[in-house]
Image (spheres, rainbow, N blue to C red):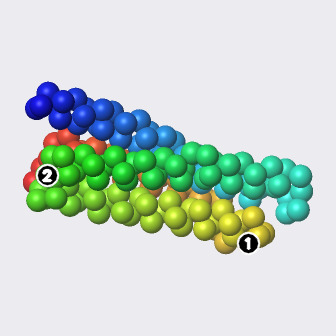
Amino acid sequence: MQQVLAMTYLWLKAGHIIFVIFWMAGLFMLPRYFVYHQEAAPGSPEERLWIDRERKLLKIILWPALTVVWVLGLALAVSIDAFGQGWFHAKLAFVLALTAYHVWLAGYATALARGERKLTGKKLRLLNEVPGIAAALIVVLVVVKPF
């Protein structure tokens, strides 16, 4: 029985890592799409292409990946009883912040589709660093378990 549980844990972990990669790839891509979108002339065919690309990225990659990351991540946390461990609380805080960032990006995509260009290209390029920094901190927490 213990071997079955161990194998289940490994499959959950593999799936979690795979979907984290998908999610992170989307989080890196979307702000870059926004930069190109904002450089397109308002109302142009190119702008319509960027609106479609952003919508597809969110619908096909980002939202499904986010959902699977959370489901598998919570299953992993339950399987190793992580809720009592300090490193897990810190990781969870970063994942919640990344989830909020994801939701904010989705809202910004909707605003861009309406023609609202609230941020400069420079600010969007800086925002593109958020997932990388968060991922580095999360990996350190999970691997090193500093507390």
Would you call the spot at circle 2 few (<14 residues within 10 Å), some (14-19), or many (20 or more)?
Answer: few
User: What element does badge 2 sit on?
Assistant: loop
User: What element does badge 1 sit on?
Assistant: loop
Q: Where 136 sits versus 13, above or below? A: below
15 or 117, which is in the foreground? 15
Q: CA distance from mark 1 to mark 2?
A: 45 Å
Q: Which residue is mark 1?
A: 116
**Residue 74, label in figure:** none
Residue 71 seen: yes
Residue in the image at 31% along x and 49% along y: 73
The kind of residue tagged 1 is Glu
The kind of residue tagged 2 is Asp
102 or 146, which is in the foreground? 102
Q: Where 69 sits versus 44, above or below? A: above
Residue 133 seen: no
**Residue 81, label in figure:** 2
Where's the C terminus, which quadrant? bottom left
